[in-house]
Image (spheres, rainbow, N blue to C red):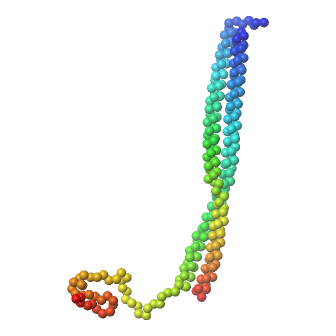
């Protein structure tokens, strides 16, 4: 009888102690989780505040940049007009020279083979090669 | 004064003690499972917090966007000054 009573009391005490221990442990963990979640909420509020600047700012930049991009052709067109008007130009020759290839005239071995050397300076004809 | 107890009551008491022990073990197991799950939640919350900190660091520079907008406005104002200047110079050159 006494042993049963002692065992019953021990069992009840063990149950209460186990409940108290686990509940204290869970309470500690939940308190820590609550602190972390509160910090997360503050960070999210900061991110929202930062992101609120993006939309109006980018819209403003896009609008102003579009105006600048549209005005730049007008500016460089005016600058080209000014440069074309004030740049000195060389005097045109009285008699226009015949057009000659800028690369010069190629030496022909066929003409040289028959003894003809053309004068490419523009005066006179060809001379027989010695 | 000792209380007399017959064998049936003794058996019932012992059975109640065994059931109580089983309940105690079950409670401990379930609370251990609860602790395990809560610790998982704790780790995941820490991960979420770290990710949010990184996201906050990434979005911290958005305060520069209004400054950039102000700079682009200044570029536009300077372009208008250039337009006025080139308009005056172009008129004088053409005349």
Q: Is residue A60 visible?
A: no
Location of residue B95 with respect to B38 vertically, above or below: below
x and y, in percent, of residue A54 in the image: 64, 58
Residue that sits furthest to the right in the current view: B1
Nearest the viewer among A105 and A81 is A105
Q: Is residue A125 visible?
A: yes
In which image quadrant can residue A6 be found? top right
Nearest the viewer among B68 and A45 is B68
Query: Residue visible at 68% across and 9% down?
Result: B10
In which image quadrant can residue B84 be found? bottom right
In the rendered picture of this protein, how many numbered marks are placed on residues? Answer: 0
Query: Residue visible at 66% across and 63% down?
Result: B67
x and y, in percent, of residue B50 in the image: 62, 45
x and y, in percent, of residue B27 in the image: 65, 25
Location of residue B40 with respect to A17 vertically, above or below: below
Seen in the image, is B60 located left or right of residue A107?
Answer: right
Nearest the viewer among A53 and A130 is A130
x and y, in percent, of residue B17 in the image: 67, 15
In which image quadrant can residue A23 be found? top right
Residue that sits furthest to the left in the current view: A114
Seen in the image, is A48 located left or right of residue A117?
Answer: right
Location of residue A93 with respect to A83 vertically, above or below: below
Query: Residue visible at 63% across and 26% down?
Result: B29
Nearest the viewer among A113 and A49 is A113
The N terminus of chain A sits in image quarter: top right
Query: Residue visible at 69% across and 21% down?
Result: A14
The C terminus of chain A sits in image quarter: bottom left
């Amino acid at each position: 009888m006494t042993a049963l009573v002692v065992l019953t009391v021990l069992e009840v005490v063990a149950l209460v102690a186990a409940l108290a221990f686990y509940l204290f442990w869970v309470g500690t963990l939940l308190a820590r989780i609550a602190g972390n979640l509160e910090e997360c909420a503050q960070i999210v509020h900061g991110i929202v505040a930062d992101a609120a600047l993006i939309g109006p700012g980018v819209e403003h930049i896009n609008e102003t940049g579009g105006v600048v991009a549209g005005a730049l052709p007008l500016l460089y067109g005016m600058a080209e007009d000014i440069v074309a008007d004030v740049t000195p130009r060389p005097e045109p020759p009285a008699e226009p020279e015949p057009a000659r290839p800028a690369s010069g005239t190629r030496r022909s071995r066929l003409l040289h083979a028959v003894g003809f050397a053309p004068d490419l300076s523009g005066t006179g004809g060809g001379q027989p090669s010695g | 004064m000792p209380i007399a107890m017959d064998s049936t009551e003794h058996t019932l008491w012992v059975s109640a003690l065994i059931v109580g022990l089983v309940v105690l073990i079950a409670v401990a197991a379930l609370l251990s499972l609860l602790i395990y799950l809560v610790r998982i939640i704790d780790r995941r919350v820490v991960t979420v917090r770290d990710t949010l900190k990184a996201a906050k660091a990434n979005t911290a520079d958005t305060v520069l966007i209004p400054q950039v907008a102000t700079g682009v406005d200044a570029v536009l104002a300077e372009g208008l000054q250039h337009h006025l200047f080139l308009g005056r110079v172009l008129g004088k050159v053409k005349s």
